[in-house]
Structures are given as structure tokens and as C-alpha cells.
Image (tube, rainbow, N blue to C red):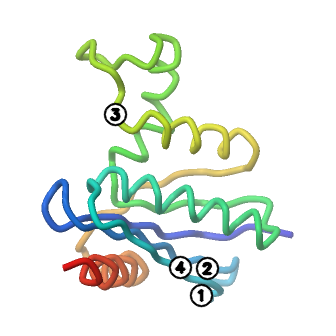
């Protein structure tokens, strides 16, 4: 059906603590066509960043879009899925510090999804006035407040 741009964000109050994730989907002409958010009572920032991207790709699939560019302010997510994951898999899910990769089950889920869909990742600076990144941040904060 075409291409979408998706902004994602995740975070928590305390780390670990109550957390939230969110995404906004934009059509090829830049119009917002969907947004979703959720949260957990006890989680970490990184888990929420991953959950946001996984949920966004699920939405891309359910809406029938062939390709997505995911814009995240998380270097952890961007570098993890575009670079580090290949080494982790080669090394039996052990990182460069010889420790088990945290959030492995989410990384495996994301890796499988990315293998089935055409997804590009870009990093955007957080809290820099980027409209849809800021919108996601507000949605994340709203989700966190539900648990406070």
C-alpha cells in the first residue's frame, strides 16, 4: 500500500519504574493517520523504547503499509537493531562486555518483525522541538501518570 513515517518514544519514571510507550504514524504526504500508546507499572526506559517500535511495526502491518521509516530518539534501539544485533546473534546473545543481552526477548521479536517488513530506522534528537517526537513524549508521560 505504500510508505509511512513513524515516530516512536518510550520512557519511565525512575528506571525501573512506571513506564509508557507511544507512536505516531504519518502518511507519505505527512498527515497523521494513527497514534497509539500504552504502558506498564514496572519497567525500564529501554523496554518501553523497544515496545514502542514493536507496536509501531504491528500497526504498520495491520494498516497494510509495505514500508516504514521509524524515527526514534533512542540510540539504543537504532544502533541495536541496525548494528549490534548481528554481533549479539553471532555471539550467542552476549554483548561486548561478555554479559547476556538485556531485553533479549524484545530484541528477538523486533528482529523477526524487521525481517518480514521493509523498515528503515533514523535517529532524531529528543526534546529538540521535533513535532511528532514531542507528541510521542507527551503521550508517554500520560501513560506513566496512570501508574503514579
Point out residue 115 in the picture as x, y percentages from the top left corner.
Answer: 70, 38
Q: Nearer the viewer, mark 4 or mark 2?
A: 4
Report how far apart the C-alphas of labels 1 and 4 lie in the structure: 12 Å
Q: Is residue 140 above or below residue 98?
A: below
For label 1, count other residues whose C-alpha is less than 10 Å away and answer few (under 14), some (14-19) or many (20+): some
Q: Which residue is mark 4?
A: 36
Instruction: Find the residue positioned furthest to the left.
Output: 14
- Left or right, 86 with reference to 62: left
Q: Which residue is mark 3?
A: 102
Q: Which residue is mark 2?
A: 26
- Mark 4 touching mark 2, by CB under 8 A? no
Residue appearing at x 35%, y 64% in the figure: 10
Q: In this figure, what is the number of numbered marks?
A: 4
* The C terminus sits in image quarter: bottom left
Report how far apart the C-alphas of labels 4 and 2 lie in the structure: 12 Å
Report how far apart the C-alphas of labels 2 and 1 lie in the structure: 4 Å
For label 2, count other residues whose C-alpha is less than 10 Å away and answer few (under 14), some (14-19) or many (20+): many
- Mark 2 touching mark 1, by CB under 8 A? yes
Amino acid at each position: 500500500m505504500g510508505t509511512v513515517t513513524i515516530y516512536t518514544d518510550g520512557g519511565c519514571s525512575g528506571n525501573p519504574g512506571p513506564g509508557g510507550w507511544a507512536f505516531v504514524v504519518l502518511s507519505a504526504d505527512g498527515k497523521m493517520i494513527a497514534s497509539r500508546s500504552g504502558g506498564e507499572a514496572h519497567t525500564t526506559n529501554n523496554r518501553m523504547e523497544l515496545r514502542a517500535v514493536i507496536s509501531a511495526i504491528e500497526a504498520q502491518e495491520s494498516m497494510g503499509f509495505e514500508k516504514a521509516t521509524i524515527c526514534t530518539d533512542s540510540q539504543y534501539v537504532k544502533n541495536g537493531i541496525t548494528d549490534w544485533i548481528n554481533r549479539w546473534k553471532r555471539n550467542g546473545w552476549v554483548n561486548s562486555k561478555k554479559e547476556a543481552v538485556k531485553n533479549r526477548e524484545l530484541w528477538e521479536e523486533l528482529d523477526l518483525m524487521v525481517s518480514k517488513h521493509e523498515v528503515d530506522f533514523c535517529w532524531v534528537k529528543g526534546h529538540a522541538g521535533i513535532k511528532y517526537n514531542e507528541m510521542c513524549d507527551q503521550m508517554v508521560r500520560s501513560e506513566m501518570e496512570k501508574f503514579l
